[in-house]
């Protein structure tokens, strides 16, 4: 009986000392599955999954099986890099919405303003005012921001 008690105690001690692997977090924050990738290179589109970590594309592959914090099946919709709007009059209203969410939600990530010659000169004071408005806007709306710094689209 004494040998059995020693064996049980020894087993409990050994099991207590063995470290269990900690639960690992998902390697990706966002996984977009089943997209039609149009990469802007001039090559034809192709089907693939895209894994995102933070604000960076971590992997593009025909199939990604690794887990992610959030997975979206885009169901054959186009995934493309940001678009450049080369003729815009975005300056109107930019101080009211300095993050230009209306453009970002359409996939536009770069604006070229003033193609008709109506740009502010000198440019530095305009950009300084824009940054000041943007900083105020983003700090005031930080509670409405999603994981990637964009306004939450959840309803």
Image (spheres, rainbow, N blue to C red):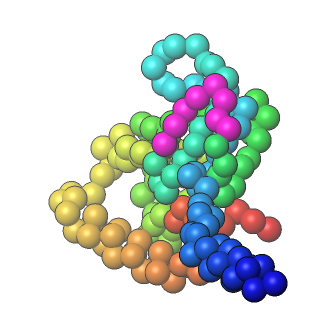
Q: Is residue 64 above or below residue 151?
A: above
Query: Can I make out residue 78 in this image?
Result: no
Q: Nearer the viewer, residue 30 or 27?
A: 27
Nearest the viewer among 28 and 138 is: 28
Residue at 71% x, 49% y is 71
Quarter-of-image position of residue 38? top right
Query: Residue at (51%, 26%) from the top-left corner?
Result: 39
The C terminus - image quarter? bottom right
Residues in magenta, as a range: 58-65
Q: In percent of the image, x 22 and y 68: which residue is there?
A: 125
Q: Is residue 119 above or below residue 151?
A: above
Displayed quadrant of residue 154: bottom right
Above or below, comparing residue 111 to residue 96 in the picture: above
* Residue 111 falls within the magenta-colored stretch: no
**15 relative to 117 in the view: left or right:** right
Q: Classify residue 121 as left or right of residue 145.
A: left
- Name the spot of residue 146 as percent of width and height, x first: 61, 67
Please tell me which residue lies in front, 114 or 4. 4
Residue visible at 64% across and 35% down in the picture: 64
Could you tell me if residue 36 is visible in this image? yes
Q: Position of residue 5 (x, y in %)?
A: 75, 84
**In this orientation, which residue lies closer to the viewer: 74 or 83?**
74
The percent coordinates of residue 151 (x first, y second) are: 60, 66
């Amino acid at each position: 009986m004494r040998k059995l008690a020693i064996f049980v105690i020894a087993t409990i001690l050994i099991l207590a000392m063995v470290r269990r692997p900690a639960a690992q977090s998902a390697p990706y924050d966002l996984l977009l599955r089943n997209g039609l990738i149009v990469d802007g290179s001039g090559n034809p589109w192709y089907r693939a999954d895209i894994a995102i970590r933070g604000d960076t594309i971590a992997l593009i592959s025909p199939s990604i099986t690794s887990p992610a914090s959030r997975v979206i099946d885009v169901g054959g919709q186009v995934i493309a890099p940001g678009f450049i709007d080369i003729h815009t009059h975005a300056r109107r209203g930019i101080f009211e919405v300095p993050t230009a969410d209306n453009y970002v939600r359409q996939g536009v990530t770069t604006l070229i303003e003033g193609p008709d010659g109506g740009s502010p000169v000198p440019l530095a004071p305009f950009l300084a005012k824009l940054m000041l408005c943007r900083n105020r806007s983003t700090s005031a709306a930080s509670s409405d921001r999603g994981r990637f710094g964009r306004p939450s689209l959840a309803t």
